[in-house]
Image: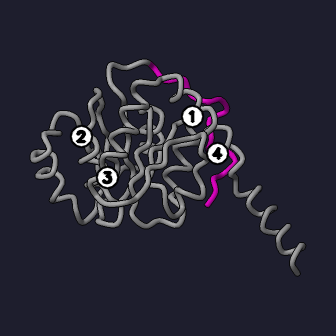
Amino acid sequence: NALPSSYSPPEKPVRSIAEHLRLVWVGSLAPIKGLSLALEALASSNTPNKLTIVGDGPLARELPGWLKNLGLEHRVDWWGQVPWLEVKRAYMENDVLLFTSLRDTSGAQFLEAMAHGMPVIALDHHGAHDWIPDNAGIKVPVTNPKETVAGLAAAIDRLWREPELREQMGNAAYEYAKKQTWENRVREIAGLYEQYM
C-alpha cells in the first residue's frame, strides 16, 4: 500500500485539546473488521473518550443495538459512508485511529491516519504488525477476545493519560507516512527487480 505524494498535509496538523480522547474507526461494517472489539474496548475504558465511526456495511443494522447494550449511545457518532474528503476531515478532527481488523494484509486506513499525524491503536497481527512502526502507535496482542478487548482499552486509557506520548507517536507516524508514497514504492520494487533479475 502507499499514498499519493500530495496526500499528506505539508505540516503535521496541530490538534486542539479536548475534554476527552477523540478516537476514529474507519472501515466497512463487516465482521472481518472487528468493530465489536472496538466498541467493547471503548465501553471497558476508564477514561473520557468518544468514538467516530466512518463506514457502512452489512452490520449497520446491528450497530444501534450494540451501542445500546454497551451504554455507548452518547459516546459514539456514526457518520456512515461518506466521500473521501470527509474521511480526511475525520482524520483531522480526531486524535487517535482505532484499527481492529481481524484480517487485513495492509490497511489503507492506518497509513492515511498516520499521514495526518495520528497515532494508531491496532491489533498486533497481519498488515498492522508489519506496517505500523513501533514508535507510531500501540499494537495489542491478539490472544482471546477478553484479553484483546482489555488490551485495546488499556491502550486507549494510556494515550489519554499520556498526551506527550500521543504527540510523539503522532510525529513519528507523520514522518513515516510522508515516505510511503507510490513514487517511492515504485522505486523500491524496481530496485528489487534489478537486484534479483
Magenta stretch, main secondary structure, is loop
| Residue 89: percent from left, percent from top | 44, 37
SS category of the residue bearing label 4: helix
SS assignment at label 3 = helix
Identify residue type, mark 4.
Ala
* Residue 4, magenta (yes or no): yes
Check contact, mark 3 vs mark 2: CB within 8 A: no
Q: CA distance from mark 4 to mark 1?
A: 12 Å
Q: Earlier in the sequence, mark 2 or mark 1?
A: 2
Amino acid residing under circle 2: Ser
- Taking the magenta stretch, the answer to whether it contains residue 34 is no
Give the magenta-colored segment's residue range: 1-16
> Which percent across, then down, holds residue 124?
48, 55
Q: How far apart are the two marked residues, 3 and 1, measured between alpha carbons?
A: 24 Å
Q: Nearer the viewer, residue 109 or 69?
A: 69
Asked whether, in this view, residue 69 is left or right of residue 173, the answer is left
Among numbered discs 4 and 3, the one appearing first in the sequence: 3
Q: Which residue is mark 4?
A: 177
Q: Which residue is mark 2?
A: 44
Give the image location of residue 47, x and y in percent.
Answer: 29, 28
How crowded is the residue under tag 4: few (<14 C-alpha within 10 Å), some, or many (20+)? many
* Quadrant position of residue 191: bottom right
> What residue is pinned by disc 1?
169
- Badge 3 or badge 1: first in the primary sequence: 3
Quarter in which the C terminus is drawn: bottom right
Name the residue that disc number 3 marks. 147
Which quadrant would the N terminus be assigned to in this image? bottom right
